Amino acid sequence: MKVPVFGALVKTAAEIKNLPIEIKQKRINPVKAQQKELRKLLSKAQNTEFGKFYHFNEILASDNTVEEFRRRVPVFDYNKLHNEWWHRNLKGEKNVTWPGRVKYFAVSSGTSEAASKFIPITRELNNKITKASIRQLVSSTRYDFPVDFYDKGVLMIGGSTDLQHNEEFGYWYGDLSGISAQKIPAWFDYFYKPGQAISKIRDWGEKMDVIVKEAHKWDIGIIVGVPSWVQLLIERIVREYNLQSIHDLWPNLKVYVHSGVAFAPYEKNFERLFGGKVTYVESYLASEGYIAYQVDLNRRVMQLLVDNGIYFEFVPFNDDNFDSDGNPAPNPQTLSLSEVEENVDYAILLSTCAGTWRYLIGDTIKFLNTKECEIVITGRTKQFLSTVGEHLSQDNLTRAVEMMADDMGISVPEFTLAGVNSGGVYGHYWYLASNDEFDKESALRKIDENLCVLNDDYVVERQHAIGRLNIEVYPPSVFYEFMEQKIGKWGGATKFPRVMKGARLDMWMEYLGNQK
């Protein structure tokens, strides 16, 4: 059954307000909006165990709520917040860090740690995520697509929507996509692909097989998902149906919404897979909340969602606030939105309507425009390399590889870097994923030269402290199979780590040894 009126409904700005969710962006003062969000969060949670322990009522009564909140409530990472508070949520207790009982937990381990994290997802946070998700999809009206485009399918590539149930304490847990699926509006079901049944499949390989089998039945206009897995899926479909490009099957595909990683390393491969023009749109959705998304078609930057259930703080990502392993200092310097500067790396702290308080999410960002709250993701607090003081951020590494790949005309969708101590001297060991043929020593030399341009600290340490540089190249499948076989995480929102350290580096080296 066709629903042609929907295209006109979404296309006409005057009619957007008739949808069952508010999706219009409001023109607001970001700093005032953030202050309002903080007061709303404190007011709602002041009678929780957390709120009483940290005297939220007194913070609200103070002359400077922002400063008093910063003074009284410590900075938390996952382990600290879980061990002191969130473990009680998992035992079914009410009113721990947010009113009521937490019924859903998103299981997440990110790319830096092996242990699973159980992130609380409340009804309020889920509503905010849904609101932002629909707001972003409908924001495509500004791209001047034809009306009939808005009747096409939206293919969302994520984890399983089939949640698991803890019988003893009565909560559900699984991928965030599964929890969010509980709140998908009924009117969106018509567009949602691969559909509820396929989305519930837990085995990623099986899910891929079914999607490929059903792909010819759909008319897809938008794809949403992490670049590495969307690329693999499209490659499978192109091979299965013997296509020149995915547009031979889905001629109306016009938008790709990606999230979580820098897209530049994947862009060449996507251009080969697409036979027509596709608009790339970036989003920033984490298990802890919907943080930002791209609002300007012509600029690959995102705008913070300052009025959507999250209060943001920012920790300058430097040696004063973090150790060499990316762990925060006991009392790091924290800044509010009114205090940040442009072109400085910050780690993000979140306080949310799920009982997350001054929580170090593990990502680093940079403001390109503080007035408009425009940001780019620069890396992870634990995915940077500073073995001898070179202070290489994930952004530095990604940019250096991207510049090399552009210069040599090759595609490098994945890479990782390790600092290896050999005889008391640290060396850098690069591992690149590519199916292209190229001179790897030339690639290594170009990466080295690029880093010298991008990072002053690297120049100094490269001359005096960094020993041997080494490079190895493998097919991308080697990287993905490592995630599946050794880490136990494959598909969905899983991202390959850009820096290897500790136990994970040991696993990686052992795995590569077996490959050889």
Image: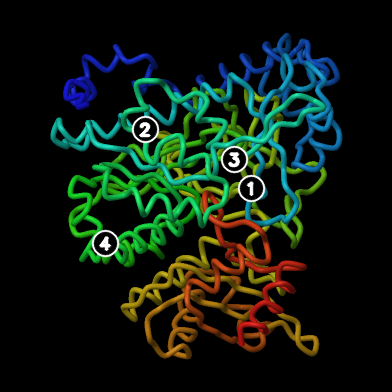
Above/below status of 212 relative to 402 = above
Look at the numbered disc 2 and give the secondary structure of its residue. Answer: helix
Residue at the location (28% across, 45% down)?
255
**Disc nearest the viewer among 1 and 4:** 4
Q: Earlier in the sequence, mark 1 or mark 4?
A: 4
Residue 115 vertical placement versus 514 (above, below): above
- Camera-nearest label, 3 or 2: 3
The kind of residue tagged 1 is Pro
Q: Where is residue 313 in the image (x, y as percent from the top left)?
A: 62, 35
Identify the residue position indicated by label 1 in the image.
Answer: 316
Identify which amino acid the numbered label 2 is placed on: Gln
The residue positioned 64% from the left and 80% from the top of the image is: 512
Q: What element carries label 4?
A: loop
Q: Distance between the residues labelled 4 and 3?
A: 30 Å
For marks 1 and 4, give the CA distance: 50 Å
Residue 52 or residue 267, whichever sits in front: 267
- Say which of 335 and 193 sits in front: 193
Give above or below for 5 relative to 90.
Answer: above
Q: In which quarter of the image is residue 107?
A: top right
| Percent of width and height locating residue 162 | 58, 37
Q: In which quarter of the image is the C terminus?
A: bottom right
Quadrant (top left, top right, bottom left, bottom right) of the N terminus: top left
Say which label, 4 or 3, has the lower sequence index: 3
Closer to the camera: disc 4 or disc 2? 4
Disc count in the image?
4
In the rendered image, which residue does mark 4 sit on?
241
Residue designated by label 2? 136
Estimate the x, y position of residue 155 in percent, counting from the top left.
Answer: 36, 42
Q: In the rendered view, does 100 fall on the left or right side of 512?
A: right
Residue 466 x %, y %: 66, 83
